[in-house]
Amino acid sequence: MKILILAAGLGKRMKSKYPKVVHNVLGKPMINWVIETAKNLGKVGVVLGYKYEEVKKVILNNVEIFIQNEQLGTGHAVMCAKDFIDENDDLLILYGDVPFITVETLEKLKNEHEIKNNDVTILTAILENPSGYGRIIREGNKIRIVEEKDANDEIKRIKEINTGIYIFKGEFIKKNLANLNNKNAQEEYYLTDIISFSNKVSTVLVEDILEVTGINDKFQLALLEKEMRRRINTKLMLEGVRIIDPENVYIDATVKIGKDSIIYPFTFIEGETVIGEDCIIGPMTRIKDSKIGNNVKIIRSEVEKATIEDNVSVGPFSRLREGTHLKENVKIGNFVETKKSIVGTNSKAQHLTYLGDATIGNNVNIGAGTITCNYDGKNKHPTFIDDNAFIGSNSSLVAPVKIGKNSIIGAGSVITNNVPEDTLALGRARQINKEGWVKTKREENKNADSKK
Ligand code: UD1
Ligand code: CA
């Protein structure tokens, strides 16, 4: 089967300068939901129009792209992709703004199509409020679809609607596209008109309306996302994840979480994130595209493109950036930022620290206020801190620099040279105590005052 996704419309009601289908739905461009589903069933083509360059920027690869310069209707959109249609293969039509259609429903449609040897098989739905949709009218063994704008009152009362999803025999649709006209209320070329040309047609009723609900404006987008999020959270909870207050936890469909992990409110878990078992995540935490082991605690923190091994504790108020790798039992505490840094087993950076382009061994203690000065204004440089080193508070490690095994850096040091192993390094002015200085000063001032 071939799949053609119609996505040329501008989506006026989105009130956006971007085409409708590039808007993110649970962290993924709307159109990519449809493409991912479609890829399970065959070769995928899309019809783009309004600002198609913007869509091309986000669209998944291995998709054939056709351009419809003027949006003259769904029939016209398919005409723009007629080279995509294979006469000896079926053609499934999907919409770029109907993101939650599932492979299971499409398989049902395909089964019906094949068993009945149809020219066209339509996915329909029964709606309490069908207004705006094309209505399904059965006449003998034929089916006709009448658009709302062309319908009389009797037709408007029909509750069975066209979802806009169908499978056509390639040969049938290719032959009949040329016969379409735009003599209707909207002066559009209606793809639906082709359906009345055949008597080998039947329908499949969709069970879950969410699957065929389109997104037209940002309010509908929010409602649909909310419902999808509810389902994602419900599924996770039934798999054994504890979610405290699921209405306030935002998890993408792509995320995996192990059982007995607890997710606290106001937490966002996004992208290709995998979290192990027995973790405590949140409250107020955002994790994106990260891999997290078992028994990890992340509280009030931001984590992106990081790898965190078992028994690590992060936060509150930590920021782990791209390329952070924390090995087992690491502790990263409040106001610590890490970037492209590896922190070895049992090492700790508990307070007010920046670790950038750093490789840190095992059992290292990074004192409060330590900064790896990795940037000289032009280039980034690495810092290496070997096992068991102790970095005193408020030290600046000016990279490139190496701190040897077991060494100690005195608090407040500015370290510009490598430190060998087992060494105490002090990089600051020696302290001077001027004993009695304050007392002398006080008496001088007193004498000066009494002479006034
Ligand atoms: C269409 C159906 C209608 C059905 C409804 C379901 C026709 C004539 N009518 O309505 O029976 O109930 O879908 O939502 O087909 N598109 C293009 N190029 C165009 C026009 C549309 O690519 O020239 C795309 C849009 O981007 C959208 C999809 O086709 O993704 C549907 O278009 P839309 O205008 O929403 O549907 P209707 O034509 O109103
Ligand atoms: Ca329309």
Image (spheres, rainbow, N blue to C red):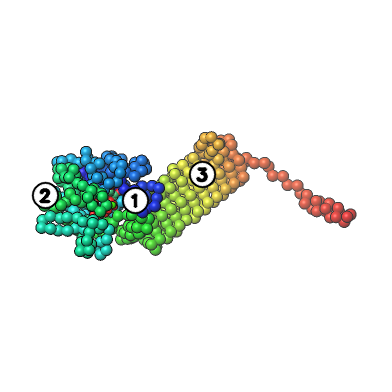
Tell whether circle 2 marks a residue whose Cβ is less than 8 angstroms from ligand 1. Answer: no
On the rendered structure, is 439 left or right of 247? right
Q: Residue at horizontal 52%, vertical 53%? A: 334
On the rendered structure, is 146 left or right of 389? left
Q: Measuring from the top left, give residue 34's x and y in whole percent.
A: 28, 49
Question: Does dot 1 land on a helix, a strand or a loop?
Answer: loop
Question: Does dot 3 land on a helix, a strand or a loop?
Answer: strand
| Residue 159 visible in this rendered orientation of the protein | no
User: Which residue was labeled with disc 1?
Assistant: 11
| Residue 14 visible in this rendered orientation of the protein | yes
Q: Residue at horizontal 26%, vertical 50%? A: 187
Nearest to viewer (mark 2 / mark 3): 2
Tell whether circle 1 marks a residue whose Cβ is less than 8 angstroms from ligand 1. Answer: yes
User: Which residue was labeled with disc 2?
Assistant: 117
Query: As rendered, which of 238 and 267 lies closer to the eye?
Result: 267
Q: Amino acid at mark 1?
A: Gly
Residue 165 numbered mark, or none: none
Q: CA–CA distance between discs 1 and 3? A: 45 Å
Circle 1 packing at 10 Å, graded few (<14), some (14-19), many (20+), is: some
Q: Is residue 52 above or below residue 126?
A: above
User: Which residue was labeled with disc 3?
Assistant: 355
Query: As rendered, which of 437 and 263 lies closer to the eye?
Result: 263
Of the two numbered discs 2 and 1 on the same chain, state the one appearing first in sequence. 1
Circle 3 packing at 10 Å, graded few (<14), some (14-19), many (20+), is: many
Q: Measuring from the top left, give residue 386's x and y in whole percent.
A: 50, 40
Q: CA–CA distance between discs 2 and 1? A: 35 Å
